[in-house]
Structure formats: C-alpha cells, structure tokens
Image: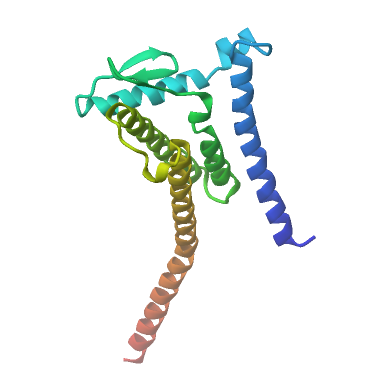
Amino acid sequence: MRKHQKEQILYLAKFLGLFCLLFYGTEAVIAFSSPGNHYSPFVADHLNFVDPFRFFLLESTRSLLSVWEIQTVFKDDFTVGIPGGRSVKMVYSCLGYGVLSFWIAFVFANRASWQKKAGWMVGGCLLLCAINIVRIALLLLAINRGWSIPFGWDHHTWFNIVAYAMIIGMIVGFGATGKKNRSLPADRRNSRNKKASIQEKTSTEAGLF
C-alpha cells in the first residue's frame, strides 16, 4: 500500500472515528439522561452536558434580543418565549450537535499543530453556535410578528444551509493558513541563502581591493 493511500485511510479513520464518538456519544447522553426506559441517574447527574448547552443557547438568545429591548421569558427548560406571545421550544434536534461534531472531527483529522487545531475548533464552534442563536432569535420574532420564512423553507433547512456554508468557508480558511505556514520555512531558507550569497559576494569583492 502506498504512503498516500495510508494517509488517506488514516485521515478517514480519524475523521469518522471522532465524528461518530461525538455525534453518537451525544445521542447516547440524550437517551440515558431523558426520562424513559433507558434513563440512567448517573448519566443524568454527572455526564449530562446537553442540558447546560441548551441553556447556554437559550440564555444567549435572550441576551441577544435584550439588546433591542425585547423581553423574553423561560417557559420551561426547553422553551423561551415573549410574554403574552408565542414561544420557541428547543428540542434536541435543534442543538446543532451534528454540525459541531462534523467541524471538530474535520479539524482533528487534518495536519496542524495542536495550538492551531484548538483555535480553529473553538472559533468554529463559537461561530456555529452564534448562527444557531441568531436562528432562534429570528424564529421567535417571526412567529410573534407574523414574518414569513423565505421560500417557505423550514428554519432547520435554513440553519443547515447557513451552517454548512460557514463550514465550507472555514475549511477553505483552514486550508489556506496551512499552505501559508508550510511555505514559511522555504521563504526563510531563500532569505537566508540570499543573505549568505550577498555576504559571500561582498567579502570576495573586498578581497580584490
């Protein structure tokens, strides 16, 4: 097997392995922390990161709308609404853990320093969360003010379109920074060689006089 083929297999193994771990791991936490046949008190009490994450998204939505002095209230742990108006319920499929899992797995599978990977993971996840927060805020305003959703598409569809467009842009940016970093050593070598050549030429000319 050629080296290039081994690298491709390793890349796919890293990407798919981490994606499945994050995506299906999140679904497992949801299943074991939700009331039902699979409920686990241990998971619900110690491993349930989903509820705090949902609270973060909903509270951030409230903070965003408060900038324009729009009052909102929590109806329950899943629901945020406008007093006297309609509400938005954030079910598990609205959390966006699919696109977040994809992005983290993509960055992890690529070659880069851990500092760069950490920066792109965190930055990308924050951008994707920001898109989701804006989506929830716009949806809440739309259902209370009678706005229509463009083209009649579901808000989930719009979120996926914008989120994956953002991911494509970040992938391009991630690749561009990688190429730039790889070109730096060669540029530095050329600069050093040029300086050495100038110094050698100068010393030769000095010896002629």
Q: Which corner quadrant holds the N terminus?
A: bottom right
| Residue 42 higher or lower than 89, as above or below | above
Q: Residue at x 47, y 36 (%)?
A: 156
> Viewed as shown, does residue 113 lie left or right of 195?
right
The part of the image, by quadrant, that contains residue 62 is top left
| Residue 3 higher or lower than 133, as above or below | below
Q: Of residues 133 and 188, which is closer to you in this image?
A: 133
Res 119 seen here: no
Q: Residue furthest bottom?
A: 208
Give x and y (percent) for residue 119.
44, 42
Q: Residue at x 48, y 29 (%)?
A: 94
Give x and y (percent) for residue 175.
49, 56
> Viewed as shown, does residue 188 lie left or right of 98?
left
| Colour scheme of the picture | rainbow
Q: Residue furthest right?
A: 1
Give x and y (percent) for residue 50.
51, 21
Q: Residue furthest top?
A: 41
Q: What is the count of numbered marks?
A: 0
Give x and y (percent) for residue 124.
44, 41
Q: Which corner quadrant holds the C terminus?
A: bottom left
> Viewed as shown, does residue 124 lie left or right of 5?
left
Q: Residue at x 38, y 30 (%)?
A: 136
Q: Residue at x 50, y 61 (%)?
A: 182
Q: Of residues 93 and 144, which is closer to you in this image?
A: 144
Res 70 seen here: yes
Q: Of residues 55 and 194, which is closer to you in this image?
A: 55
